Image (cartoon, helix red, strand yellow):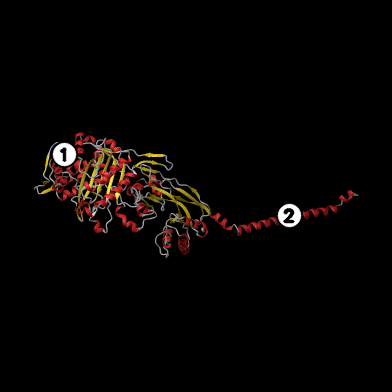
Amino acid sequence: MKSSIMDDPKKKEITKKRHFSFRINIFFFVTFLLFSVLIVRLAILQFVQAKDLKAAENTNTNQTNKIAPIRGNIYDSTKSPLAYTIPVQSLFFRIEPGQDKDANIDLAKRIERDIFDKAKPNTVSPTAEEIVLAMDLGYDINKKPVKDPSYYSVPRRIKADLSNAEIAFLLEHRDEFKGLEVTEESIRTYEVEDDKTTIATQLVGYTNAFSTETAKKIYKDNPNSEEYLSNENVGFDGIERMYQDELRGKNGSKKYPVNAAMKIIGRAEVTAPIKGNNLYLSINKDVQKATEKMLHDHIQYLRSPSNANDAYLKYGVKASSGFAVAMEVDTGRVITMANYPDYDANAWTGGMATATYKEIETYIQNGTITTAKAKYPDAKENAKHPSSIVFMGSTIKPLSVLIGLKEKLFTAGQTYYDTGTFTFGRDGNSAISNSDRHAYGSLNASSAIEVSSNTYMSAMVGIPFWNKFGRENAKVTAKWAEYLAKFGMGVQTGSGLPGEYAGSNDFIKNAEKDSYQSAMVYASWGQNEKTTTLQLAQYTATLASRGKRMKPQFVEEIRDYQGNLVKTIEPEVLDDSSKEFSQADWNTIIHGMKSGAQGIDELPFNVARKTGTSTQDVAGGRVENAVLIAFAPVENPKLAVAVVVPEGGFGRYGASPIAAKIFEAYDAAYGGVLTKLGGGKRPW
């Protein structure tokens, strides 16, 4: 019975239909479910993810921006900082193609109103007008064209060194200010003293924006300048410029993913920059500070109205500037290089105000190597005063005598009777005289240097030299210049400082104006050659070493930011003429370097020195510049000093006290080295 049922064809057919119907229902249910999932997914893509997917579809590149490195520090020889870099947070604006003018101008106004005004920072903040210009949009706040914008990919700095309140406000409202970003960068800072000026200001130099036309000219031939960023600061003068490549370091980068419309669509990938190397200078901070203070104090003393009636000090009452350099004889290391007036180099940070620049523009440059002078009310008054480049005056006399001895124009013991005046010229109508027409009587080579006899130099060096080397032709000039160059006059010192002046020789000009004979007479006692203070210091060191002209060195070591030694700067001899002159001749001139010099005679060691009064004609008439060269100790020379005080009068009073202070400060800073080397004060 049971078997018959299972074999019933109709029942089998019914069972098959039921199974088929069930499978069909399952199939349609699964199909419906799949279509439902697909529709939901399409809806999500269309309405939720469409914007992101569209941007992702258009992504085809990365945009890379360079990050300027942190500049290396500058230290003195005692490792005290003179210039260093501090990290700050700065506000930048990123311009992108197609931005609306009205929206950008409105953003600038909101930055001023909602960020700077509400945060109330202690620092000065830019106005909306200045913000628009800083954005580099190609137009000002009134939509008037000003210049074509720089590359779109370069962020524009709106303000450096944000206050904590400004940073907090920006972080809190970051979504309200599109296109703005806060980025860490560095600011150059210079060590400031109590008098509100920086140390060795003109030597250390300063930095300014690479975007300026001046910077482009300075670095046009520097292959590394291709890596510089328009918004970074580079060295403009002094050590900052001379060692730009060492101080700068290497760029980092920020790589942004961008779409075809150059819109940033993701987080940046940052590669940190490499910090620049640190410099350790030969400058000693304590000696430098003492020199700067003495320049200031002594010039104020010279200007005292009470000196107007003094027989000697009255010639220095108009002194307004001063320059001093001290250089080690055996190494060429420059221990101090001081300018007066100086200024606070931090005024360059963030851009110097026009009023500040106008106030200091005449002495921004380093007056020990090029032209500088104090500030005067106007151009007419300015023309009445000399610059830092002055005639050598009597400081040339040791060399004049040395040349005369070398050329056998006279002997060391040969005497000359000084009557106070000397006549020369074809008809004997030209005459020169000593200071105050003083007659010194019988003189030899050494005593002529000591009393600073103009007549001796003219009669025993000037005229005989002119006779020996061609009289009225350029051979005289060439031979004289050849000798001077061996001691650093008329040529650059080799220091490498940017803008260094090689001095000038007015020999040809004076010869054409009068005669070669007249020019040679004046050259013999220093009224033809104009020099820088650094040249005088190098010349003095060459005399002290008896003929070795050393390259002035300002940097002792270069180390990386981790303190590892990169390079040691070794002493360098530029010229060695020591064997061209006999030891007896050297002894003769050094024995004569005993000019009266205030302050120097009180030092506990012997100092060879030559004071001078450099006479110069300016628009206001004839002025007397105080000059001095000196080295110590005589027995074992270690330090050479040169001082120039334009309109300072006699070198004995206008320059010598400054030099004495430098020797004193150096001896104190280096453990009494001058006193020890000299073996105490004794006749020489």
The foreground one among 501 and 260 is 501
Mark 1 lies on residue: 445
Q: Residue 27, which numbered label? A: 2
Q: How many marks?
A: 2
Mark 2 to mark 1 CA distance (whole Å): 126 Å
Q: Nearer the viewer, residue 600 or 512?
A: 600
Q: Earlier in the sequence, mark 2 or mark 1?
A: 2
In x, y percent, where is residue 388? 26, 50
Residue type, mark 2 in image: Phe
Residue 524 coordinates in the image, percent (x, y): 17, 44
Q: Check disc 1 and give the amino acid type.
A: Ala
- Percent across and percent down for residue 582 are 20, 34
Horizontal side, residue 173 vs residue 412: left or right: right
Q: Where is residue 415 drawn, in percent x and y?
A: 12, 38
Where is residue 247, by image quadrant? top left
Is 404 situated left or right of 225 in this image?
left
Name the element at disc 1. Answer: helix
How packed mark 2 is, by other alpha carbons closer than 10 Å (few <14, some 14-19, many 20 or more), is few
| Residue 183 is at least partly visible in this image | yes
